[in-house]
Image (cartoon, rainbow, N blue to C red):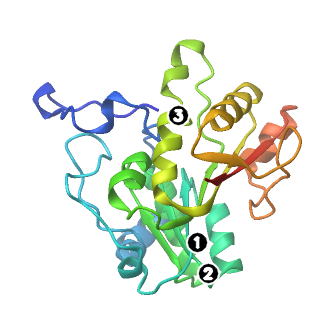
Amino acid sequence: MTEEQPQTRRQYDPTTFRDKPVSFVRRGGRMTSSQERAWDDDHGRYVLDIKNGPAAASLAEGETGDPVELFGRDAPLTVEIGSGQGHAILHACESHPERNFLAVEVFRGGLARTVLGAVEAGVENLRLAEVNAPELLERYLPAGSVEEIWVFFPDPWAKVKHHKRRLISPEFARIAHRALAPGGTLRLATDWEEYALHMRDVLDEAPEFTRAFDGDWAERYEGRVLTAFEQKGTQKGRDIRDLTYSRV
């Protein structure tokens, strides 16, 4: 997806992911007063202190994190890419206190809303990362440290000329395989039919993964709460497509 441009060309570092698709679209917008208070008071409790590289939301060279240290315990880890306002991952945190959850999002308002929800729910098994997800999966987290990766409703980049910006690609399959533990799970969902077909083709052909469903599509993942975004897509007549793959 897109990102903000560096202020000067000499700030661009070709070793970062800016020649590859990224996991986000940079958005502006103001936070509500409650979100601002949550961010000021509690972001240090949940948001990881990750040093950025020269490009927007990039990962600084050599920056790494150990989930056991980040959470203060050893537990199965789920990473959600593009967590938005945190509806799905907050529900998961409350439903599965025995697991750890890492939400990856660069929309500051969404992060603040997630922090607010986490404080209200009193969850302790959640951390948030304000960084480009492919870099986090490939270079920040240890190999094989993630049990599940969620990618729910990524930007479909509908125009053909923009398909190269799509997150789900053979390169992403390689990166996800590196982060996942043996037998780990990759869950995807979209309301965009053509992108669903694209994702299925990419992962069916990826030697790193095998289908974890029968038929054309996976059953709806029961852990994904019904959000306003998903409801809107359904109301427009779009079919919600789920896919589930296991790491080989």
Front residue of 26/144: it is 144
Residue type at the position of mark 1: Gly
Mark number displayed over residue 117: 1
The residue under label 2 is 121
Residue type at the position of mark 3? Pro
Give the residue at x 36% y 48%.
Answer: 135
Q: Can residue 44 be seen in the rendering of this structure?
A: yes
User: What number of labels is visible?
Assistant: 3
Q: Is residue 198 left or right of residue 119?
A: right
Q: Which residue is mark 3?
A: 170
Task: For marks 1 and 3, give the one nearer the viewer.
Answer: 3
User: Tag 2's secondary structure?
Assistant: helix
Task: Look at discs 3 and 2 and give the one toward the viewer.
Answer: 3
Q: Are marks 1 and 2 in contact (CB under 8 Å)?
A: yes
The amino acid beneath tag 2 is: Ala
**Alpha carbons under labels 1 and 2: distance apart:** 6 Å
